[in-house]
Image (cartoon, rainbow, N blue to C red):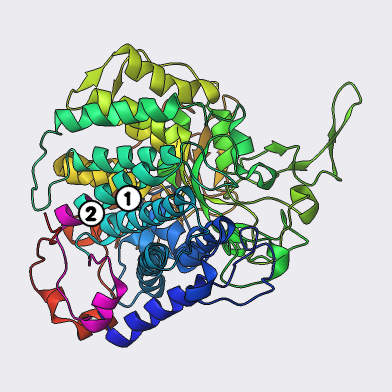
Amino acid sequence: MKKINFIYTLLGGAALLFASCGDDFLDQTPKDQYTADTYYSSDEAVRKGTEPLFNRAWFDFNRRAIVGMGSYRANDAWNPYVSAEFARFNVTSLTEDMSLAWSALYNVVTMCNATLENLQTRTTSDVSESAKNAGMGECYLMRGWAYFYLLRGWGDNFLFERNQDVINNSVRPLNTEASVLKFIIRDFRRAAQLLPESGTDHHPSRYAALAALAKALLAQSGWEENNHNDHSRNEATLKEVVSLCDSVINCGQYRLMSNYADLFKAQNNDNSETILAMRWADPNLGEWGTMNALYSDLAFPEVSDDVNCWGGSLVASTDMIDLYNQDPADSIRIQSTFFTPGGYYDYMHTTDTAYTDKSGTVHWGYIYNHNWMQCKKGVLGRKADVAPCHLAQMASPLNTYIQRLADVYLMKAEAILGNADETSDPQALEAFNTVRRRAHVHPYTKISLADIIRERRIEFCMEYFNWWDMVTWYRWKPSYMLNFFNNQQHRACEMREGDIRKNADGTFSYRCVPPGTNTWYITDPSNGHVYWNDFIATSETDNTPVAGRGTRKSYTYNYNDLVSQYTTGYQPIVLSETNIFMPYPESDVIQNHYFNEAPVEYDFGE
């Protein structure tokens, strides 16, 4: 790695550990300055000393890259103007957001390492063993999560437990994916041993570590680097995943929020479903590096008209719309994820009159009067809509979920499915349908991997989760997932306002511009007819179905076949082993010849 940059990260991470001592998760300015030798003298100091691991350390990962990496690559949504290279899978070693994310995740690692060393060597006799153990458990938990993102983002990575080792020798070989995953699992097991049975002041309990361990073990059960054939998951590991999921589900500390939309309201930060999250400072503090800085990319002026924001081009992918069209009754999750034509939001613009119903009752709120589907998750409305929380330009009060309880239910269902094509196991169905019941949609009587993929995509769309799970499935079933990526998903299709219409049955009609073409819409050049997903129009402005060619809902097309036939210059986005994992930052590669050599196993000292 580039020595000067990496040492700067180490020193900067250590300095940040004392930037928020005494804060309520960075909500106040510290009155005193401390050093590592004088700080760790009370249980409260230890508790506050780990809090930067939940915010500052992650800032440059969360600021923008997390959307492109976790959601655009999964084809949740599409924005041709911001981070589009992630959706197009043409990230290069010079992509700024990729490099920032890489550095930020290693910043988490170095801050965890520094805090661990301080807790092990600098705590006074006034610090209780339980507080010391809880602090160390949090370090192992957050370091494990940082490496889990690094593994699924880049594959082989650098493992180290002491920052001084890297300062002494920054030019070091990469470690294998298997070693990285083993390291992650070891960290999560250690965290589970050290964290308390119940968390305090929003600090995690041991069950947050058990949920993380279940997710890492589910990945390890089928993870094989350099195996390009679908293979089986380890059954013993899957059984442990089920047991861990049951422990989390039954611990009594978490429950699903009854209203899915409530998960994404600032007033419900640290809700009953949150297992682990990045927790951000009050936007009114104006302290760059401590806030959730995504807001201006996500929100658009109409909906947040008292906050300076410039988003709005982030819209639902055609792929997600196709999934929503399969089950329009899933309206709560659809409308909570994307603004939909005619959608009514009674918790936004609450001082505006939305409409008066037939009985004469006046309703207050916001109606989305556009034939488009802009991003809703993470978009909060006006400042008054988030009270008593605060909202500012590039500063949202929302936590960033790392893991919530719905993930544990769906992991349990997936682990029980295991290597079978499908299952009707009662426990798997109960876990799977618990998530669906909350969304008020029909239960399944059997499930397959395809069902689990679909359910996770809808449940976690635009929460920056979905791509990471897809990488896990790819390392287990590479052929299956490449077919999914390249033959079942429609990627980077641009749509403009007016290109989406909501039908009476709750489904959506859409037309789009295929990527890499000079075509305005998908048309038949012989007659100028315009293709929508479910009907054919006589022209760009006439949306009446063509006589004799089918009526609405009776015509569908294969997108990939259609665009290649009716357009010129179409170049589909093709995923393979060469672009599923991101390239390493060029500055690091130049300084370290080991990037061009085979990775090595990590010495665990066993």
Q: Identify the image quadrant of residue 149.
A: bottom left
Query: Which element is circle 2 on?
Result: helix
Nearer to us of marks 2 and 1 is 2
- Badge 2: how crowded within 10 Å, few (<14), some, or many (20+)? many
Q: Residue 409's x, y, as percent?
A: 40, 28
Instruction: Please provide the residue range marked out in magenta.
Output: 158-181
Along the line of sight, the residue nearer the viewer: 41 or 511 = 41
Question: Where does label 2 land, which residue?
Answer: 183
Q: Residue at x 36, y 67 (%)?
A: 117
Q: Identify the image quadrant of residue 580.
A: bottom left
* Distance CA(mark 2)–CA(mark 1): 45 Å
The amino acid type, in three-letter code, at marker 1 is Val
Q: Is residue 451 visible?
A: no
The amino acid type, in three-letter code, at marker 2 is Phe
As displayed, is residue 255 above or below residue 570? above
380 left or right of 355 in image? left
As displayed, is residue 91 above or below residue 549? below
Along the line of sight, the residue nearer the viewer: 58 or 458 = 58
Q: Is residue 177 magenta?
A: yes
Q: Residue at x 47, y 31 (%)?
A: 325
Q: Residue 274's x, y, as percent?
A: 53, 40
Return the disc, 2 or 1, that comes first in the chain's sequence.
2
Q: Residue 457's x, y, as percent?
A: 41, 38
263 left or right of 106 in image? right
Q: Is residue 479 visible?
A: yes
Query: Which element is circle 1 on?
Result: helix
Q: Identify the image quadrant of residue 322.
A: top left
Question: Where does label 1 land, which residue?
Answer: 563
Q: Residue at x 16, y 64 (%)?
A: 175
